Image (cartoon, coloured by chain):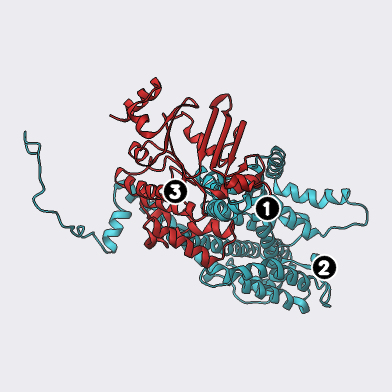
């Protein structure tokens, strides 16, 4: 734990981004991002496609490298050092649009892989932990199946359980319901709501405005790599201030 | 269609019904598959004619007119296959010039090898880890000591006495065991983010892939001694084995790279987000999937390697084919049917091994597919 500042880790700030910029080639994908997420806070990020919202949360666990600015996650200052990045990733769970379960492993093995290899947890203990979280997401009976045998909604719930098995302090969700059939969206959102109710720090990129209203402490609207507007959900939806936000909301809230 | 009325309400649910009974039995099968159309019928008849033209003479040559036993060429003069020749030369074909009194050592090594490979090849047998340790560490050491006689107080048998099927198998197994891991490393190197590693891997692969194996073998046998200091020798067989292993690792690298490219980016990201290290990601998530995808390509390369071991003949080593070829020069067996028999026999042996490899890979593929049950 050489690079962890314990006082910061226990402080009220979970994520702090200061002046973060990111380019893909010449394309300026993130522009002067300043964002502070308090511990236990639920943030929903929305915006049109290509606005940089996915890139932003992918910078938090270094799936993308930012080129300037400072990111501090859970008291750990992000750098290019592999050890430090792995340390951050152990504390930050992520759920993807495409689930990204490992198709060659069973549901149970998907969940025990990281605890067993990263946390060096004994097999029996890892399996007990995995079963506990599979029960949490209400699919313990699927433990010995392979991802390909499950529906999209079930797979996404497994992905959440897999991330939770690492006991993360922060959870990132990158459009978790965007590739699901409409009838499966609710089962995934229900799990996310219950997670929020337990006080998990969450950063969620989503277009589920119902979820944002119900759960978010703050809604952030992004466009062209910039944070355009942020506000509490009620104010954000009923009284958007920026023209771009109004236009966006008029498109998605028909 | 209900006319202008666009509403519909299902009065009662439709229960599932059995599918219509298919046409079964051999006659309908023949009609459906071999004589379904005029073109299909013509093709079937042409193929049957071709088989009728080629198969009986082959059977006559290989079985009816063949000489099965005999002491010399006199039994092999009436045009059929000369299997008696194979029988007379069988020890040469199997062991080469390995001293007859020491041949039991080759047999012991073969038994030890089979004892290691068979349980490894059967998925149900437990203890795969120890099996691999035995095959990769203990077995090579034991085999080396037994076969050469070095370190175990047995008579020393230099590798220039080795030959026949024995050398074919030693070379092929060595090549297979080295080329797969080396190929995996090269494939990873070629996709590395570090430019130097990438360039070196790509250069190595392209260098070996761009040169014919025969040329590589000639260079190793003729040119290497020029560069080595005088007095230093490098076993010729080992040189040939290394050449084949390295040559095929370049091909293997490209096969594995194909598998790596088939793995969606999400698998890398999913495993990264869990905090797995690079080696853990490769070993636990990426490689198991990538290698499964390219099993046909891997086995294809193994088969090509197995057959190409016969090229070591060009630098004066006698594998199965080389041994058979040199055995045909025996004047006691000078007969027109002897070379034909020898080459058909060599072909048959190679084919049996390669076909076995191929069938086994299909078995493994099916098994992996069943375990996974992708939709």
Residue B272, x across and y down, in percent: 56, 47
Rendered colour, chain B: cyan
Q: Is residue B219 visible?
A: yes
Q: Which residue is identified by label 2? A: B158
Q: CA distance from mark 1 to mark 2?
A: 28 Å
Q: Which mark is residue B182?
A: 1
Q: How many marks?
A: 3
Q: Which residue appears at 44% of the width and 62% of the height?
A: A131
Q: Secondary structure at mark 1?
A: helix
Q: CA distance from mark 2 to mark 3?
A: 74 Å
Chain shown red: that is A
- In the image, is residue A254 above or below residue B116? above
Q: Which residue appears at 54% of the width and 67% of the height?
A: B62
Q: Which residue appears at 42% of the width and 35% of the height?
A: A218
- The front one of A220 and B195 is A220
Q: Earlier in the sequence, mark 1 or mark 2?
A: 2
- In the image, is residue A44 above or below residue B130? above
Q: Residues within 10 Å of mark 3 (few under 14, many from 20)?
A: few
Q: Which residue is identified by label 3? A: A199
Which-is-in-front pick, marks 2 and 3? Answer: 3
Asked if residue A186 lies left or right of residue A64, the reply is: left
- The front one of B289 and A203 is A203
Which-is-in-front pick, marks 1 and 3? Answer: 3
Q: Secondary structure at mark 3?
A: loop
């Amino acid at each position: 734990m050489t690079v962890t500042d314990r006082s910061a880790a226990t402080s009220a700030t979970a994520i702090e981004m200061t002046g973060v910029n990111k380019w893909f080639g010449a394309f300026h994908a993130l522009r002067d991002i300043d964002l502070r997420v308090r511990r236990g806070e639920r943030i929903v990020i929305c915006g049109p496609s290509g606005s940089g919202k996915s890139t932003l949360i992918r910078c938090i666990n270094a799936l993308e490298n930012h080129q300037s600015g400072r990111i501090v996650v859970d008291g750990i200052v992000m750098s290019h050092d592999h050890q430090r990045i792995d340390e951050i990733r152990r504390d930050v769970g992520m759920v993807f649009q495409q689930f990204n379960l490992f198709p060659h492993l069973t549901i149970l093995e998907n969940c025990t892989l990281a605890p067993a290899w990263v946390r060096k947890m004994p097999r029996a203990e890892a399996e007990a932990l995995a079963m506990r979280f599979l029960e949490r997401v209400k699919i313990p009976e699927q433990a010995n199946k392979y991802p390909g045998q499950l529906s999209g909604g079930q797979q996404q719930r497994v992905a959440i359980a897999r991330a939770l098995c690492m006991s993360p302090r922060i959870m990132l969700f990158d459009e978790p319901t965007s590739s699901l059939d409409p009838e499966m969206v609710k089962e995934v959102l229900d799990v996310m709501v219950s997670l929020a109710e337990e006080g998990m720090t969450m950063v969620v990129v989503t277009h589920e405005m119902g979820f944002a209203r119900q759960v978010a402490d703050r809604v952030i609207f992004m466009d062209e790599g910039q944070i355009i507007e942020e506000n509490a959900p009620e104010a954000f939806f009923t009284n958007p201030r920026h023209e771009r936000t109004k236009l966006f909301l008029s498109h998605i809230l028909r | 269609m209900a006319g202008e009325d666009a509403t519909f309400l299902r009065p009662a649910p439709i229960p599932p019904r059995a599918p219509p009974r298919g046409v079964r039995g051999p006659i309908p099968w023949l009609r459906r598959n071999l004589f379904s159309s005029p073109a299909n019928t013509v093709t079937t008849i042409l193929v049957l004619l071709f088989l009728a033209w080629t198969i009986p003479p082959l059977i006559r040559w290989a079985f009816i007119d063949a000489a099965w036993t005999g002491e010399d060429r006199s039994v092999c003069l009436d045009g059929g296959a000369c299997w008696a020749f194979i029988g007379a030369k069988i020890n040469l074909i199997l062991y080469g010039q390995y001293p007859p009194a020491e041949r039991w050592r080759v047999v012991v090594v073969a038994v030890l090898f089979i004892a290691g490979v068979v349980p490894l090849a059967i998925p149900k047998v437990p203890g795969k880890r120890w099996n691999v340790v035995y095959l990769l560490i203990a077995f090579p050491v034991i085999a080396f000591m037994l076969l050469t006689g070095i370190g175990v107080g047995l008579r020393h048998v230099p590798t220039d006495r080795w030959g026949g099927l024995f050398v074919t198998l030693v070379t092929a197994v060595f090549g297979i065991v080295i080329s797969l891991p080396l190929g995996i490393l090269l494939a990873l190197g070629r996709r590395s983010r570090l430019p130097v590693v990438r360039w070196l891997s790509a250069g190595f692969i392209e260098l070996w892939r761009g040169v014919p194996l025969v040329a590589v073998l000639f260079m190793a046998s003729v040119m290497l001694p020029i560069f080595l200091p005088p007095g230093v020798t490098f076993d010729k067989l080992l040189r040939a084995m290394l050449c084949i292993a390295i040559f095929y690792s370049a091909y293997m690298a490209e096969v594995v790279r194909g598998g790596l490219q088939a793995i969606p980016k999400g698998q890398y990201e999913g495993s990264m987000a869990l905090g797995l290290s690079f080696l853990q990601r490769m070993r636990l998530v990426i490689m198991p999937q990538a290698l499964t995808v390219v099993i046909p390509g891997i086995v294809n390369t193994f088969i090509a390697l197995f057959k190409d071991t016969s090229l070591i003949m060009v630098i004066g080593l006698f594998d199965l084919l080389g041994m058979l070829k040199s055995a045909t020069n025996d004047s006691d067996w000078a007969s027109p049917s002897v070379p034909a028999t020898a080459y058909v026999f060599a072909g048959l042996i190679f084919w049996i091994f390669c076909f076995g490899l191929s069938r086994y890979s299909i078995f493994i593929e099916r098994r992996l597919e069943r375990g996974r049950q992708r939709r």
